[in-house]
């Protein structure tokens, strides 16, 4: 299938995104919408989250071209406010230093984005395919070919295991799919603005199908050695038309693209006057 979403190369995309707005919106202090009784459901009665989804608002949108019929999914809803990151004094100094070396963002080197960043990609750019049965929910991300397989069998997190995406364990609370994520390796950033977490990160995600074509995504990020209080974000995922699909994403781990950055960002290019 010819690509319905036109993109630049990963290295150029990473370069341009350095100047973009960070992470998803703050979590509003309002109750979540109640799911409709007419939601698509699996044979066991759980909401059926399966399909291809795109973040519908927030993040940098300038590289999005549009679908074959001209629809720009990134423009559905205005850009939300950025979340508030309240750092501990030591972490604040580290964050300030990372702002000066944004080229070291692991995602710019094709490493896995981590959680919640895997879903908090620029709106309208990289979709996620959700596959679900009675035992698992799997998230297949186009970006970085990132895969999260989430058991829903009440098993515990493994011991002595640390990963870029951590370890995810899911459960259902009514019609909301709740995912507890821990066991992070502490190497991921939250965005390209230097916001970061360490190995003490813990994430609680909530996926609520509010109508057949909309998932409300909420995440609370707790990291006591980095943040004074938890960071909360909230945005929606919109269903992608059935004629579209995940496209090949070529980004080799450890890729270097400093030649695309300006000198002030740690690269070799002079900034245009």
Image: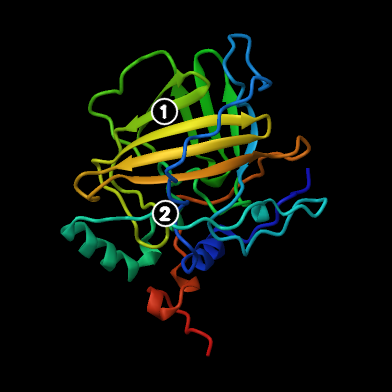
Q: Nearer the viewer, residue 183 or 25?
A: 25
Q: Nearer the viewer, residue 240 or 87?
A: 87
Position of 17 with respect to 223 (left or right) is right
Determine the residue located farthest toward the right in the rendered image. Answer: 69
Q: Residues within 10 Å of mark 2 (few under 14, many from 20)?
A: few
Q: In the drawing, what numbered circle is on residue 32?
A: none
Determine the residue located farthest toward the bottom in the rendered image. Answer: 273
Q: Which residue in the structure is indicated by mark 1?
A: 179
Q: In the drawing, what numbered circle is on residue 254?
A: 2
| Residue 81 position (above or below residue 111) | below
| Image quadrant occupied by the N terminus | top right
| Label 2 secondary element | loop
Position of 253 with respect to 251 (left or right) is left
**Where's residue 129, x and y in %?**
61, 34
| Residue drawn at x 51%, y 45% as measured from the top left | 144
The answer to whether any part of residue 153 appears in the image is: yes
Q: Nearer the viewer, residue 23 or 13?
A: 23
Position of 181 with respect to 57 (left or right) is left
| Residue drawn at x 64%, y 19% as measured from the top left | 37
**Where's residue 121, x and y in %?**
52, 50
Determine the residue located farthest toward the top in the rendered image. Answer: 44
């Amino acid at each position: 299938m010819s690509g319905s979403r036109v993109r630049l190369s990963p290295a150029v995309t990473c370069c341009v995104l350095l100047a973009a707005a960070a992470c998803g919106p703050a979590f509003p202090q309002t109750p979540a919408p109640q799911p409709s009784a007419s939601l698509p459901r699996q044979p066991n009665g759980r909401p059926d989250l399966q399909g291809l989804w795109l973040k519908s608002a927030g993040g940098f949108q300038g590289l999005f071209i549009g679908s074959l019929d001209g629809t720009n999914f990134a423009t559905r809803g205005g850009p939300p406010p950025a979340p508030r990151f309240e750092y501990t004094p030591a972490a604040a100094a580290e964050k300030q230093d990372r702002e000066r070396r944004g080229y070291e963002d692991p995602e710019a080197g094709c490493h896995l984005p981590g959680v919640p960043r895997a879903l908090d990609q620029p709106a309208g750019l990289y979709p996620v395919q959700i596959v679900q049965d009675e035992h698992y929910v799997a998230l297949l991300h186009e970006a970085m070919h990132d895969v999260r397989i989430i058991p829903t069998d009440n098993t515990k997190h493994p011991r002595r295991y640390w990963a870029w995406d951590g370890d995810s364990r899911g459960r259902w609370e009514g019609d909301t799919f709740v995912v507890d994520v821990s066991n992070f390796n502490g190497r991921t950033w939250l965005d390209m603005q230097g916001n970061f977490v360490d190995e003490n990160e813990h994430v609680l995600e909530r996926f609520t199908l509010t109508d057949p074509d909309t998932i409300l995504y909420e995440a609370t990020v707790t990291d006591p050695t980095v943040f004074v209080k938890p960071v909360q974000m909230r945005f929606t995922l919109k269903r992608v038309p059935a004629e579209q699909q995940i496209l090949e994403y070529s980004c080799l781990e450890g890729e270097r693209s400093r030649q695309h950055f300006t000198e002030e960002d740690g690269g070799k290019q002079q900034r245009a006057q």
